[in-house]
Image: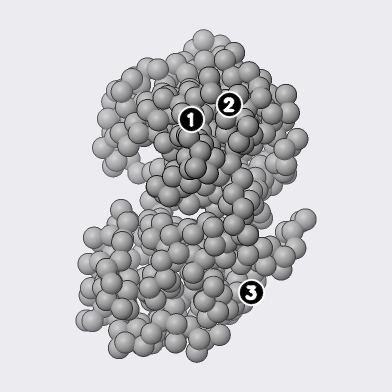
Amino acid sequence: MKTSIQLQQENLEELGSNMPVPTYNRTDNKIGIVHVGVGGFHRAHQAYYLHQLRQLGEAPDWGICGIGLRDADTKIKNILKTQDHLYTLMVKHPDGKIEPEVIGSIVDFEMGTTDPELVIARMANANTKIVSLTITEGGYNFNPTTGKFNFDNPDIQHELRHPQDPKTVYGFLTAALKRRRDTGLPAFTILSCDNIEHNGDMARKMLLAFAKVQDEELATWIAQEVRFPNSMVDRITPVTTKADIDTLAQNYGVDDAWPVTCEPFIQWVVEDTFSNGRPPFEKVGVQFVPDVGPYEKMKLRLLNAGHSVLGILGAIHGHTTINACVEDEVFANYLRAFLDEEATPVLGDIEGINLEDYKDSLLERFANPNIKDSVSRICSESSAKLPKFLIPTLHENLAAGGSFKFATLVLAAWCYYSDKQLDQHGKPLEIIDAMSNELHNMASETKDDPLAFIKQESLFGDLAKKDSFASTYTSMLQKLYTGIKINELMQSMI
């Protein structure tokens, strides 16, 4: 057992005997990127790409300043500050190999909840050229049915009245952009890295909707000057566990309070339209394209939807991790049938991508026994995920006369999951969803109205009015509620 060493800048030389550490100068870093939402994914993806560039001697003016806009972000801010903003990335391979590396591309962190002016000033600084976002699907503040901005949000109402006391990402962005405009500085790029189809377009639409109400002249300037490239991001990044922290300390001698674990696979496809320059990310494998649409649709409809298929069905069955689902032949075959028969037909051709190879790689990635991505994490916030990842595929196949049975069973299982809140062995499920109470109430009415759950048009659109879907869904739901095991039902459909 190694004696662990505190992860800090002054200890990097000593830590470098155990793993790769930053070889570049971090003390005179200019901050070129301000990133809102420093979670595990950002640290395993965008920050890692920039770290690779810095290791090549590139991009010295592109350090990252993290931004927290929620009280919960105080924990990551304090840990990173203690560690000189260093953290360890642990890449976990299917064969059990772990490759740890200390990442140094984040150089500062500010909290918008404690001092909004510090965040506004950082975004408005002349050196800041990109503000990037991983704020989750829910952070975009739009109605999933209408696609319109939610002005009823109390925080939005507050910052419309008090522009210099922002609460949400929109208040901070408009305050900083106004300051840049008023001082003659060029606009920064707003780069969304969230799992939303056309994420840049969505960020632009929502910001302009907000800005037009707050300051119409500013909204016109933003529309003309700010670029919002769409991007597709991909790397499975499970929640860090105590076992990960202990492994790092015991096997590699590093005392890191919040390392990040991830799979070996990584992908980033970005539209090459920026307001004020960008790092040369293509030197470390980022793909720049004129239109990211086909790539992001592929990822959302195959990887993200595939995760939800395994997650919802696996939760009902009693599987606790995604790799356990894929190790179950019934689940692996069911997932492949969904990908082949329902998801692939709505995608079309994607330049440079062999879809059969991509689907093969998904099964391999999901099966990685070292990742052990929890089913509960995949199922979390399903009300925000399924309307983007799975339900559009169902609608498109219904319209085209294609297969829709595999996706339909997932929705029936989601109803059972939301109603019973137990798996089929009677074990309580960990349900994390902003709409959990509403979902439970609607699902509990199923005994009186089999379509009650599906009648939530904000989530499902008009599915309940489509006879072919409604009859298939009702039949599946009846089987689940009469005790037929989910794996038996899946097996009968393959």
Residues under labels 3 and 1: Cα distance? 49 Å
Circle 1 packing at 10 Å, graded few (<14), some (14-19), many (20+), is some
Asked if 478 appears above or below 38 in the picture, the reply is: below
Q: Nearer the viewer, residue 160 or 240?
A: 240
State the image coordinates of residue 161 (x, y, percent, origin top left).
Answer: 28, 25
Residues under labels 2 and 3: Cα distance? 50 Å
Q: Which residue is mark 2?
A: 14
State the image coordinates of residue 228 (x, y, percent, origin top left).
Answer: 58, 36
- Amino acid type at circle 3 is Asp
Looking at the rendered image, the disc whose residue lies closer to the viewer, 2 or 3, is 2
Task: Point out the tag, 1 or 2, that comes first from the N-terminus.
Answer: 1
What's the mark number on residue 109? none
Q: Which residue is mark 1?
A: 5
What number of labels is visible?
3
Asked if 262 appears above or below 130 in the picture, the reply is: below
Tell me if I can see residue 478 in this picture.
no
What secondary structure is found at the residue carrying circle 3? helix
Residue at 49% across / 71% down in the picture? Answer: 325
**Tags 1 and 2 touching, CB below 8 Å:** yes
What's the mark number on residue 340? 3
